[in-house]
Amino acid sequence: MFVTSTWVFVLIGAGTGLVGALLGLGGGIFLVPLLTVGLGLPIRQAITASLISVIATASASATVNLNRGLVNLRLGLLLEMATAVGGLGGALLSHLLTQRQLFLTFAATMALMSTAMLVRSKRRNVIDDVGQDPGRLGGRIEEEGRPYVYHLRRGPVALLSSLFAGAISGLLGLGGGIVKVPVLSTFCGIPIKVAAGTSTFMIGVTAATSAFVNYSRGDLNPELTAAVCLGALPASLLGARLSQKVQARSLKLLMVVVLLAVGLRMALEGR
Amino acid sequence: MKGAASSLDRLVEGLLSVGVVLAGLLLLAGLLRHDPAVLRAGLLLLMFTPVSRVVVVTVALFAQRDWAFGLMSLWILLVLLSSLRVAHFI
């Protein structure tokens, strides 16, 4: 049977998978601190476990989101391209910033984003006039039984933020959803459920890119990683289903809380 | 166009479901039997699930003659392959 520590890892994976899938994140942003600060595991093992668990959460919740038409495949491909470049660039440019500068930049970004999100949380991204053409990168969505249309706005902002998301995901061992979902839903006209759904479609690939490198470097703790993923898989299926039942505004407010908590932790880390 | 896109959605959904369920079963078996080889197989299957997704989407977009988005997907596949190369998987 499982030893006690295995159950702890399964539960941690379930918790991060649930919140991650609700918001379109992989959950790496919670998992890495929980494993290192909380349980005292070496950072490299934690990052590798986190990357593989992001793949698990993203793949499982993407199945639910694809089924409900909440993944904008074309938008996902376009942004994933920028994320991939960001991932490569982040690895090459990481020596230009010190660890401290990196954490502080990250904390400032989170603070700025949560403020913008809070201020704009009452705005709706969906358009009632279903006769409008959503364009190649927009789409259609049904909310509470009513059809709506949405357009991509400020395309360059979406691309730049994806570039940034790719860069930090390579550096910190995350999927990058924590950057993309708030930017897409706050500034780019994408309804938060579509932003979250499309994010789950993208971040599995982002995390896989770094996961292979970490795996071959021998940073893998198989029992730990398997236990975390085993918790994350069913929990993220549940989280993705649950997000359908929650109002868009509540999701935005939950995201604000997560951004503030993460930003605060990063600021403390960069002190 | 819309019908084609939604059938691609369904294809990707099926692919991801198979990867996730098989990987989950391998991880469970590996943990219960304390078998590191089964655990590694499950984790590798999980890691290759997004790769197979990118391959399928790239092929499907080119088959639909959607050149612009097909090329984007191909670019993502090349980045993934270069990561596999760096990691000495290929």
Image (cartoon, rainbow, N blue to C red):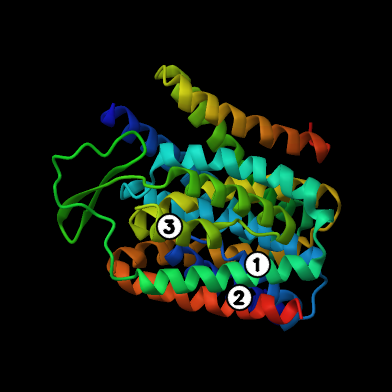
Residue B46 at least partly seen: no
Residue A180 at least partly seen: yes
* Mark seen at residue A106: 1
Q: Position of residue A58 (x, y in %)?
A: 52, 54
Do callouts 2 and 1 mark residues in contact (Cβ within 8 Å)?
A: yes
Q: CA distance from mark 3 to mark 1?
A: 20 Å
* Mark seen at residue A196: 3
* Mark seen at residue A263: 2
- Residue at (79% x, 71% y) in the render: A100
Nearest the viewer among A126 and B17 is A126
- Residue at (81% x, 63% y) in the render: A44
Give the letter of the chain under mark 2.
A
Q: Amino acid at mark 3?
A: Ala
How crowded pointer 3 is (Cα within 10 Å; few <14, some 14-19, many 20+) is rated as many
Q: CA distance from mark 3 to mark 2?
A: 20 Å
How crowded pointer 1 is (Cα within 10 Å; few <14, some 14-19, many 20+) is rated as many
**Is residue B82 toward the left or the right of residue A217 in the image?**
left
Which of labels 3 and 1 is toward the front? 1
Q: A225 above or below B90? A: below
How crowded pointer 2 is (Cα within 10 Å; few <14, some 14-19, many 20+) is rated as many
Labels 3 and 2: the sequence-earlier one:
3
